[in-house]
Amino acid sequence: MPDAIRRIDYYYVTVPDKPGEVARVLAAIRGAGVNLLGVSAFPHGARKSQVDLILEDSGAFAQAAKSARLKLSKKKSGFLIQGEDRPGAVADLAGKLAQAKINITSVQAFCAGAGRYGGMLWVKAKDMRRASKALGLG
């Protein structure tokens, strides 16, 4: 079975780097009934954290974020990658982008169990169209 790759939208919020802040953001999204495809959080500047929120439905999310008073970044895009777990699965995708001379900004991939893997991959906005083509999305 070939890898499944699709474009995803995401936003990020910047929060204080202290206990409970990521939980507060995620609880607000859950409370609005919005499902996320993924979340990633990491330190971002002095005593701040960036929380990337990868969306299943960006319209519903925007309303939930507004209700929760979350200050969102501009909408950004990336790729959701999924497939059968095997040695080099992500290396194959990275190789396609390298051949197209596209730099990967960030990638996170994990074994999902049951012989599957999943992850997220980002490139610069100016490279999204070329990356889509290099990854076989047309």
Image (cartoon, rainbow, N blue to C red):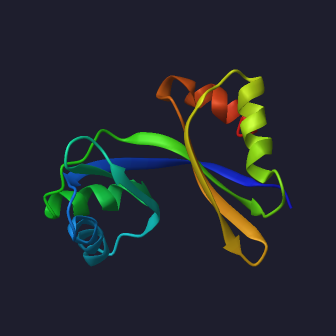
Q: Is residue 46 above or below residue 116?
A: above
Q: Is residue 132 visible?
A: yes
Residue at 65% from the left image edge and 31% from the top image edge? 131
Q: Position of residue 87 (x, y in %)?
A: 84, 56
Q: Is residue 52 visible?
A: no
Which residue lies at the image location 53% right of the left edge and 43% below the top edge?
Answer: 78
Q: Nearer the viewer, residue 123 or 34?
A: 123
Image vertical order of residue 117 relative to residue 41, above or below: below
Quarter of the image with the C terminus is top right
Query: In which image quadrant can residue 101 be found?
Result: top right
- Can you give x and y, in whole percent of width and height, for residue 112 in the image? 66, 71
Locate residue 111 relative to residue 80 in the image: left or right. Answer: right
Q: Is residue 134 left or right of residue 6?
A: right
The image quadrant of residue 67 is: bottom left
- Residue 62: which quarter of the image? bottom left
List x then y, in percent, for residue 96.
Answer: 77, 33
Q: Residue at x 45, y 48 (%)?
A: 9
Residue 36 location, x and y as percent?
A: 43, 65
User: Looking at the rendering, in which quadrant would you find the N terminus?
Assistant: bottom right
Report how many numbered discs are placed on residues in the image.
Answer: 0
* Left/right of residue 25 with respect to residue 77 in the rendered view: left
The vertical placement of 137 against 101, above or below, is: below
Residue placed most toward the observer, 57 or 79: 79
